[in-house]
Amino acid sequence: MFSKVLIANRGEIALRIIRACKEMGVRTVAVYSQPDVNSLHVRLADEAICIGRAAPAESYLSIPSIISAAEIADVEAIHPGYGFLAENAHFAEICASCNINFIGPKPEPMRLMGDKLQAKATMRKAGIPVVPGSTEAVQDKDKAIKIAQRLKYPVIIKAAAGGGGKGMRVCHNDVRLVSALLTAQAEAEAAFGKPEVYIEKYFSRPRHIEFQILADNFGRIIHLGERDCTIQRRHQKLIEESPSMAINAKLRKRMGEAAIKAAKSVNYNSAGTIEFLLDEKNNFYFLEMNTRIQVEHGVTEMVTGVDLLKEQIRIAAGEKLRLNQDDVKIKGWAMECRINAEDPNNNFTPSPGRITSYNVPGGPGVRVDSCVYQNYNILPYYDSLIAKLIAHGKTRNEAIRIMLRALEEYVIEPVKTTLPFCRDVLNDARFLRGKVYTDFTDILISEKQKE
């Protein structure tokens, strides 16, 4: 096992990694930007090193600064968390060249799965169903129109190197397609440094289902069940739960086997997630693979009892996976609400600022992963996620009741947050019945605006 690990991240995921390391007897080194000097991850780590100014490019995305900090602190490994450099194959290669272990997969599967077109081609070759669409980048409008007409509208344009909803545009006709193509290419170039986009068939009422996997360096791969991530806004997840009401035991087995097969096809090693679209006829299609720990990993931890961070660290340290597929048991129901510093009544505009009143919910079945505290200043430079509120109950209804109680207890003022919007979702009759699709929040927002 490692004796010292550097966390190349900030916020709640940095705290989560620090806590896992402390419980494993591993010393931790935090890195931080200048305005993050008073952050909890800086306070709780054994050591902390400033790596630059506020802008991510000058701190959390600065590979030279992070590697320098790792060498100064004499660490054996770096954990990238999620976001920033977590899926950067070049960063993983730099770590290896400096004899520093990267707590994540090898660079090859990371690079392959990072290119959505290559990832789809690999899955097709492995016999895993993929969303129908173009097999190569689409650059001109004539080719785009030809592909869209073959697929039949609606279609969606996606960035080949993308994620998080960047470079995505839904199109219902040729006119919209032509204008959206240029916009998506420009957005992809700005967000990922690559303008390549592709076109897929757009399913109007799918569910978004992902399977958590663990894979060691000795060929053992298991899945830990699914997470239903259907509640989204602008392709960003808002509420996740496990298990899914849309999945029965037979379908879970088929999708889980497909997830393992997908990981094997790229010789994957580490924690990872295979994401699928599930249509109304229970046909599933490979969407993408996240080669990192997920934001919503805590949902899976609550229903399986498996600490994914610790397992990921053990795998990176060269240990064999101690779990077999038969060891994985789903107990009860878990649900996560992402609490963002955004104003739901003002088009979810970011709401940075100082928290002067803060009360954390507690009690049985409640878990809060957060980096904030009273008098904490929410910075405008980074992602607006400030907390993940997770509830666990014996049944879905109990998990919902626990979550609603926790949402009412949670006080974060005076900044605006998504707490009230989460309550609206959980109180909605469609959500309570489990009859939701990826367009649910758009419909809910539209309804509320008309009230």
Image (cartoon, helix red, strand yellow):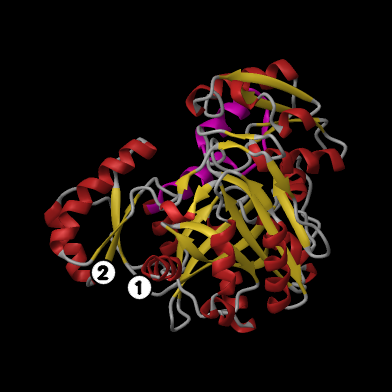
Instruction: Report the span colored magenta.
Output: 88-116
Position above or below: 182 against 438? above
Nearer to the camera, 263 or 279? 279
Query: Label 1: which residue?
Result: 204
Q: Which mark is residue 52?
A: none
Dominant secondary-structure state across the stretch colored magenta: helix
Earlier-in-chain disc, 2 versus 1 = 2
* Residue 328 in magenta stretch: no
Position above or below: 95 against 280? above
User: Which of the 4 image quadrants contains residue 23?
Assistant: top right
Q: How many marks?
A: 2
Amino acid type of disc 2? Pro
Q: CA distance from mark 2 to mark 1?
A: 8 Å
Amino acid type of disc 1? Ser
Nearer to the camera, 34 or 2? 34
- The crowding category of the residue bearing disc 1, from other C-alpha atoms within 10 Å (few below 14, some 14 to 19, many at least 20), is some
Q: Which mark is residue 154?
A: 2
Q: Position of residue 236 (x, y in %)?
A: 47, 55
Q: Secondary structure at mark 1?
A: loop
Report the quarter where the N terminus lies. top right
Position above or below: 145 against 11? below
Q: Secondary structure at mark 2?
A: loop
Q: Position of residue 106 (x, y in %)?
A: 59, 41
Q: Are marks 2 and 1 in contact (CB under 8 Å)?
A: yes
* Residue 93 in magenta stretch: yes
Residue found 78% across the figure and 59% down from its top: 306
Q: Please give left or right for residue 46 compared with residue 348 in the image.
A: right
Residue found 60% across the figure and 52% down from its top: 339
